[in-house]
Each structure stands twice: as C-alpha cells, then as structure tokens.
Amino acid sequence: MSVPGDCDRISPILSHVGNKWAALTVLVLSEGPKRYNQLRREIETVSQRMLTVTLRGLERDGLVRREVFAERMPPQVEYSLTPLGETLVQPLFALCQWSAVNCDAIERNQADYDGPGRHARQAG
C-alpha cells in the first residue's frame, strides 16, 4: 500500500489536523457550536494561548467557522465546524477509538522498551 496523494502536500495538513489540540477541538465541536470558554472547559488541559492558536489554524484551513454575535451584550463569539470540518470527525473518532482500545497494550510496550537494561542494549 502506498501513501495516497503527494507527500509534500499532505504532510503539512496531517501535521496540523493530526495534532492533539486540533483533533480534540474538532471532536468537541462535532457536538455542536461552542463559545470559547465552553471549549476551554471541555478541553481541560489546553492553555488559552494554544486554544487560540488552534482555532485560528482550523479557521484558516476552512475547518472551523468563527461567528461574532455583536447584538448580544457583551458580544459573543461562537465556533462551529464547517462542512469540510465535519468530514474530519469520523476519521478522528476512529483514531481516538483505536487509541482507547489499544492504550493498555501500547503502554505495556513502552514500559518494556524503556525498561531496565534498555540503555545498555543500545550502547552495545
């Protein structure tokens, strides 16, 4: 099996949409539109700066829509997935599901790999 598409073109896209903050943001927005503070509460470990950078990148890519409601007091901003962003939900969900099913095995493999004697084996 070969990589579909042009590696030079798809590599930056995979790097961006495959990062944990972008993936989590898309999955949270798949539940429906959210305000910024709602996103911060639901993605508990993301910093304010990282969420802002992530939302701007997703908006630039056309995956997220930012809508300002100036008539509300105070004005509110709401984020939602675009139709293109919605096409990303199923693959990301499948990857998260795979991770959940396999996290115990991966953690065991990592512990075995990092276990005692590892550095001695590498030097030899």
Image (spheres, rainbow, N blue to C red):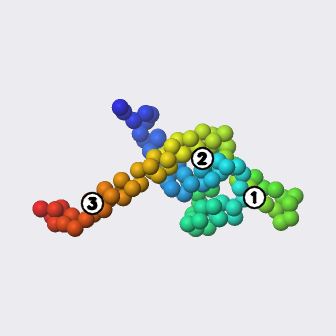
Q: Which mark is residue 61?
A: 2
Camera-side mark, 2 or 1: 1
- Considering only order in the chain, which callout, 1 or 2, is on the residue closer to the N terminus? 2
Residue 12 visible in the snapshot: no
Quarter containing the C terminus: bottom left
Instruction: Identify the element where label 1 is drawn.
Output: strand
Please report the residue visible at 72 percent of the width from the left and 51 percent of the height from the top. 33
Residue 78 visible in the snapshot: yes
Q: Which mark is residue 77?
A: 1
Of residues 112 and 84, the one nearer the viewer is: 112
Pinpoint residue 40: horizontal percent, then vertical percent: 64, 64
Q: Amino acid at mark 2?
A: Asp
Q: Which mark is residue 53?
A: none
Q: Say few, some or many: other residues with alpha carbon within 10 Å of mark 1 (under 14 / 14 to 19 / 20 or more).
A: some
Spatial CA distance of label 2 from label 3 is 39 Å
Camera-side mark, 1 or 3: 3
Q: Amino acid at mark 1?
A: Val
Please report the residue visible at 67 percent of the width from the left and 49 percent of the height from the top. 31
Q: Amino acid at mark 3?
A: Asp
Q: In screen coordinates, is 37 left or right of 46?
A: right
- Considering only order in the chain, which callout, 3 or 2, is on the residue closer to the N terminus? 2
Pinpoint residue 49: horizontal percent, then vertical percent: 59, 66
Is there a contact, CB below 8 Å, between mark 1 and mark 3?
no
Of residues 101 and 53, the one nearer the viewer is: 101
Instruction: Identify the element where label 2 is drawn.
Output: loop
Pinpoint residue 109: horizontal percent, then vertical percent: 31, 56
- Considering only order in the chain, which callout, 3 or 1, is on the residue closer to the N terminus? 1
Residue under label 3: 112
Q: In screen coordinates, is 4 left or right of 26?
A: left
Q: In screen coordinates, is 16 left or right of 105?
A: right
